[in-house]
Structures are given as structure tokens and as C-alpha cells.
Amino acid sequence: MLKAAAELMQKHIILDTDPGIDDSLAILLAAASPEIVVDGVVSVHGNVSTEQTTRNALAVLELAKAGHVPVYKGCDLPLVKESLLSPETHGDSGLGYAELPEPLNQPGAGHGSDYIIERIMSEPGEITLVCIGPLTNVALAIRQEPRIVENVKEAFIMGGAIQYPGNTTALAEFNTFVDPHAAHIVFHSGMPITLTPLDVTYQCVFTKDDLNRLLKINSPITKFIADSTRFYMEFHDEYQSIEGCVINDPMTLALTFMPEICDYQDLVVDVDLSTGVGLGNTFADFYNYEKKPKNMRVAMGVRPRLFMEMFLERMEKLAQGAFAQGSESNG
Ligand code: BDR
Ligand code: CA
């Protein structure tokens, strides 16, 4: 395809993220994916504080030679609940054992939720949201400017556990548990949503063999992946007896350009806001007892190796410098 035609077909994305080890892998995948252009990254609290997720987003973009992508700092607290961070999963820095140089760039001026509003309203129907952290920024943006709901192209959201156990409480997934009120606002906003819950992400494990394949290339990218996922694998081993690690966030990003990785069901999905053991639990009314309109498309089946082969190939290309600025640069 001619380069100009290919560029016209690229999806323009805002990545709302809390890096985070798997968030960082999603940033690397974005930088290695010619089907998408990352217009901007918005940071949010979650795996670590927003101060740290902002710094990590800048540093990982620079590692991927995508330092031209602007980063906007978003909310540092959930809408209603107290803050909950997860150093046991992602390390104190959010990047496991990886150490990246201080980023050269600074975050852009203005709040992340204002950036979301400004981008969506200035190009109606063109901007895809990819949300891989707690949904605080997006919920705030909806409350500030409800018209973004009709004007966003679509939203891909990593969150929830529909028929799968929680990874933070017995019932709740991390992103929906950390800010269930934000998830409630977004889920019921009317935005066109594709949800990637733990039901599919936990079928897809990044293994030591996958890592060893990448380590055949000696590069700062493969070193970063090795140092960050080593911590993440230790967490999965200790807490969940999983060999390897589940990389939820890059799978969510991948669905924007490779939807065939998953099978989907249109469902009525809600999030529990009651202050008991169910807080943050996401559940689907499969038989639609309540006769409500379906509010999202949910990935419920997955082809794990289809995703993983694509991910590994793109990480290899990134590590070999194929996407260095000045060549097939992306983002
Ligand atoms: C989600 O929570 C975080 O630990 C990950 O970054 C991912 O977005 C998985 O539950
Ligand atoms: Ca995340």
C-alpha cells in the first residue's frame, strides 16, 4: 500500500495508562505498530503514583525512540475511594527491576482529562481511547464534557473479570477495584466500549521461553523487557503460582489493530459499588434479566499465540531498531 494511504488508515489513539510493567510493554507495542498513531499519553494513578507513572511513561517512550509523543499528567486519586497502589506487583518504581534514565522530556501543560476532551472534541469521530489503568481520567472527562461520549470513535478498556476470579480481591480486577466509581461512570456513559477482562488476558502468559527468544537480540529494549518482567514473573509465581507473567495491557492495545485475537460478546456489564466483598466486581447479565441495552462488547475468547507471536515479532523489530525515528517512525 502507498505510504500516504496507509497513514490515512492509521487509528489515532490516546493511551490512558499507569505504567506499570505491562503498561510499559503496551507503550513499546504502540511504538512498534504502524497501524496506529499515538497522539498522546495520559498518566493516571494505579500501579504507582501519578508522579511516577508520568515519569515512567516519558522514560519508556524515550526508550522506544518515541519521545516526540506528548505525555499529560492525569488524576492522582480515585474519584471516591482512597488510593491503592500495587508495589508488590510492579515494584516501588512501577518498572520492576528495570532502571531507565531520567527522561529528557517534561509532561505537557494542562491536565490529562482536559487533553482527552480537547483531542476528542477537536476531531469528532477520529480518536480512539485505549485505557489500561483505573478509569479516573476518562470518568472526569465525561463529567466535564459529556459530549465526548458521542464524539470519541471508540474506547478499548483493560479491566474487570466477568467469569474469572479477581486479581486484587476474590471478585475484583485491579483497575475496576482501584476506581470502581470511575468504571461505573464510563461503563454506563454510552461510549462504544470494547472490554478486555481477565477472562482473556489470563489465557495468555508471557513465558521465560518468550523472554529468551527476545534476549537473542542484545538491545536496551530487550534488557528493559527482561529486567521488568523478571519482577512481574516473581510476583505471578509467588501470588498466583503462574510460570511467566500475564501481560494484560498490550493485549488490550493489540485489539485496536488485530481484533481477530479475540472473540466477543455484546453484553450488559455492571460494576459493584456496594461497600462489601463485591466492591469493584464486574458482572454480566448474560440472560439480560433486566432487559437493559447492551453497553459493551466484551472479549470472552482468545487466541493466545496469535497475540504472543505478533507481540514477540514486533518487540524483535523494535529491538533491532526498525522503528527508530527517521525510519518507519510511529507514535
Ligand atoms: C491491570 O492491573 C494492573 O496491574 C495492570 O497494569 C493491568 O492494567 C490488570 O488487572
Ligand atoms: Ca495498567
Image (spheres, grey):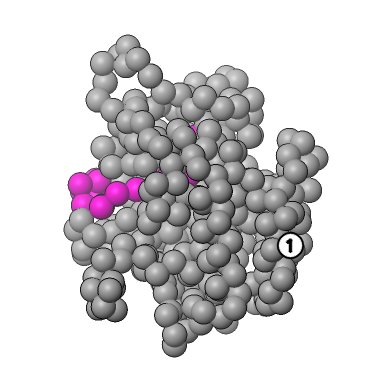
Q: Is residue 77 visible?
A: no
Q: Is residue 197 above or below residue 135?
A: above
Residue 77 rendering spot, x and y as whole percentages: 53, 47
Taking 233 as reference, is 9 left or right?
Answer: left
Q: Considering the image in quadrants, where does the C terminus appear?
A: bottom left
Q: Considering the image in quadrants, where does the N terminus appear?
A: bottom left
* Residue at numbered disc 1: 212
Residue at 60% over, 54% down: 22
Magenta stretch holds residue 151? yes
Q: Is residue 68 above or below residue 128?
A: below
Q: Amino acid at mark 1?
A: Asn
Residue 25 rendering spot, x and y as whole percentages: 58, 60
Front residue of this view, candidates 184 and 10: 10
Magenta stretch holds residue 108? no
Front residue of this view, candidates 219 and 142: 219
Residue at 37% over, 42% down: 194
Q: Which residues are magenta?
A: 146-160
Front residue of this view, candidates 281 and 145: 281
Residue 308 rendering spot, x and y as whole percentages: 56, 53
Q: Is residue 244 visible?
A: yes
Front residue of this view, candidates 73 and 244: 244
**Does the beta carbon of the residue at mark 1 sit less than 8 Å from ligand 1?**
no
Taking 294 as reference, is 314 left or right?
Answer: right
Residue 81 rendering spot, x and y as whole percentages: 54, 36
Taking 71 as reference, is 210 left or right?
Answer: right
Q: Residues within 10 Å of mark 1 (few under 14, many from 20)?
A: few
Residue at 78% over, 48% down: 234
- Farthest top residue? 289
Residue at 32% over, 12% down: 289
Is label 1 in a helix, a strand or a loop?
helix
